Amino acid sequence: MSPPLISILMPAYNASAFLAQAIECILSQTYQNIELLIADDASTDNTRNLIEAYAQKDTRIKLCHNKTNLGYLKTWNNLIAQAKGDFIAFQDADDFSDLSRLQLQFEFLTRHFEIALVGTNFSYIDARGDKSVSTSQYPTGHEEISKKIPDLIPFCGSSIMIRREVYDTIGGYREYFDRIGAEDYDWILLAMEKFKVANLPAVLYYYRLSQNSVTRTFTYNGRRKLFASQIVKELYEQRQKNGIDYLQTGRLDLLTGFEKKLDEEFANDESHFYWYIGKKLFYEGNKTEAMWFFKQAIVKNPLRLKYYRDYFYFLRQSPPTVS
């Protein structure tokens, strides 16, 4: 009998600079009975051509390209709907995994039938991929993890492997989070309300801090992304209190009102937005991008002395360990 099939999901958009490493780290896994579902999300670079070149050489690659740009969330949902594996794992197109990652996660799940979702620790790496910037130290057991939520969701979303029953029970990412992020954290919390979870203590996933990666993600006009994690927390607390949340009841008007209240402190002060993001990134362990945002706060409001003090203070500090 063949070992169980593991499906790996890889949405890809303008990822040609790092895509080869992402694909090869999956095809070269010590666990070989896999299908790699890849979707090019209407990239404007050479991403699609690279994917198709690999697919011609390895029949385990399944092409699921988008005709138009759908964004990460909808692309991921389309991929997981087509996955045929008994287990499903995730891999971003600009990151890479240890070659033993799938084997170790699979073996863990086969030994621990009570666990349905398992992540790993991860390292932030520089754009070249040869230098670790910081490393996570996540709790490993379900009870330890549960004590951290919802203030912290101690998982690297892209490092996760699940049993198929998780998806069959809770479905994919909720589309309210389309293009604002934190959809994986919302999904993990929903999963934890139905299943037990765990993390492997080993660093098996490598999250690349590519040049301008965060500066492309956080913009003042698109600052709804800033509130995504707070929305996740609010919805979680509603379910804990009432057994149901605004999205499940269809009360989008109430959720929009909650977002508007969160936005009040930023609506009339663009510099405060950049300063806030700088601090957020620094304490998440991303000093390089944090310093860029502190500089932008100074550019937006060069008369605010606090920004200069903070810039030089954080410049001398080392970011904390991700935990």
Image (cartoon, rainbow, N blue to C red):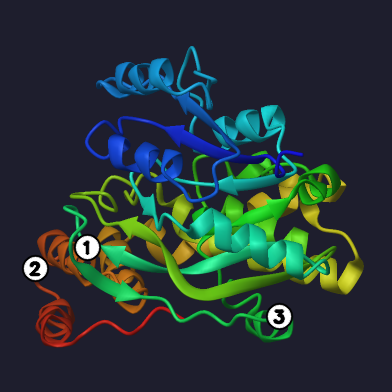
Crowd class of label 1 (few under 14; some 14 to 19; many from 20; radius 10 Å): many
Looking at the image, which is closer to me, 43 or 243? 43
- Image coords of residue 3 (percent x, y): 70, 44
> What element does badge 3 sit on?
helix
Badge 2 is on which residue?
302
Identify the residue shown where x is 72% and y is 79%.
142
Tell me if label 3 and label 1 are in contact, CB under 8 Å.
Answer: no
Badge 3 is on which residue?
146
Which residue is outermost to the right? 243
Residue 293 appearing in the image: yes
Q: Nearer the viewer, mark 1 or mark 2?
A: 1
Q: Which sits earlier in the primary sequence, circle 1 or circle 2?
A: 1
Where, by quadrant of the figure, is residue 289 drawn? bottom left
Crowd class of label 2 (few under 14; some 14 to 19; many from 20; radius 10 Å): some
Q: Vertical placement of 24 versus 220: above or below?
A: above
Identify the residue shown where x is 10% and y is 79%.
308
Label 1, label 2: how many angstroms apart (C-alpha)?
Answer: 19 Å
> What element does badge 2 sit on?
loop
Left or right for 116, reference 188: right
Residue type marked 2: Pro
In the picture, the quarter occupied by the N terminus is top right
Badge 1 is on which residue?
289
Where, by quadrant of the figure, is residue 285 drawn? bottom left
Crowd class of label 3 (few under 14; some 14 to 19; many from 20; radius 10 Å): some
- Image coords of residue 50 (percent x, y): 30, 22
Residue type marked 3: Ser
